[in-house]
Amino acid sequence: MTANRKVVLIGQTVATDLFPSIDPIGKQITVGGTMFTVVGVLGNKGSASFNDPNDVAIAPVSAVRASLTGYGALSQILVQATSPDRVTQAQNEITGILNTQLKVTNTASEPFRILNQAELLSTRTDTAKTFTVLLGAVAGISLLVGGIGITNIMMVTVTERTREIGIRKALGARRRTIMTQFLVEATVLSVLGGGFGVIGALIGSQFSIVGIKPVIVPSSVALALGVSVAIGLFFGSYPASRAASLRPIEALRYE
């Protein structure tokens, strides 16, 4: 910490990008115009949605201050516990050390804040739930609007085909037959809309959005088409029932 040694630990991503086929230990890299010697490679930290935890370089704070940033105040310190079950203990120890170093007498107004990964994960989970609810509400409104559109289209279809319905019923077509016909038409209309939506999603999944690559899950496609069928049956039931309930004489007189 005090020797100002220009050494650095690099993450897996940095090691792969800078030294794809050789051992990086002992090699030198340039950081802000200053040469640092690689003395180790950090273990794989997994992946994240926005920031790559393996795309990191760690150097002694004394060397960073002397060569890169100057002797300003530290705004953030990252500490890693030796194991997940010792996170709380490490947090308590850090709190005690900072209170001692900063001579804090009133712990109710500490001039620092400590966050652990569990708190950050909880915050991220709550945020994800909020976005899920919002997206669900938008999807629900879209389904309602689409269903009303199907109802209106089918009502217009029934009106335009009133005489046809009367002729079919006069020739012996049953109520169930007429109703099934219009339910099938409404369902096909809804499934076509769902199919175009799936095609749009497949095309959109080929592009990155805010650095995120969408992934199409086959079960989601099946669910989308299933919901399309349900919407067609539900919102097409009233026009189909109305068509099936027409009396042949009244239908034949319709102009």
Image: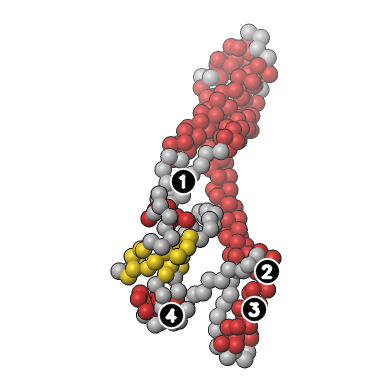
- Mark 2 = which residue? 86
The Cα–Cα distance between marks 1 and 4, rounded to whole angstroms, is 44 Å
- Mark 1 = which residue? 213
Q: In the image, what residue type sits under mark 2? A: Arg
Give the answer, above or below, for where 126 lies relative to 135: below
Q: Looking at the image, is mark 2 or mark 1 earlier in the sequence?
A: 2
Q: Looking at the image, is mark 3 or mark 4 earlier in the sequence?
A: 4
Q: Looking at the image, is mark 4 or mark 2 earlier in the sequence?
A: 4
The Cα–Cα distance between marks 3 and 1, rounded to whole angstroms, is 40 Å
- Mark 4 = which residue? 3
Which element is circle 4 on?
loop
Q: In the image, what residue type sits under mark 3? A: Glu
Question: Which residue is nearer to you in this view: 182 or 200?
Answer: 200
Front label number (3 vs 1): 3
Q: Which residue: 60% across, 15% down?
A: 166
- Mark 3 = which residue? 93
Give the answer, above or below, for where 145 lies relative to 169: below
Question: Which residue is nearer to you in this view: 132 or 213?
Answer: 213
Q: Position of residue 39 (x, y in %)?
A: 45, 65
Q: In the image, what residue type sits under mark 1? A: Lys
Q: Residue 18 sits in which quadrant? A: bottom left
Q: Residues within 10 Å of mark 4 (few under 14, many from 20)?
A: few
Q: Position of residue 193 (x, y in %)?
A: 50, 32
The Cα–Cα distance between marks 2 and 1, rounded to whole angstroms, is 35 Å
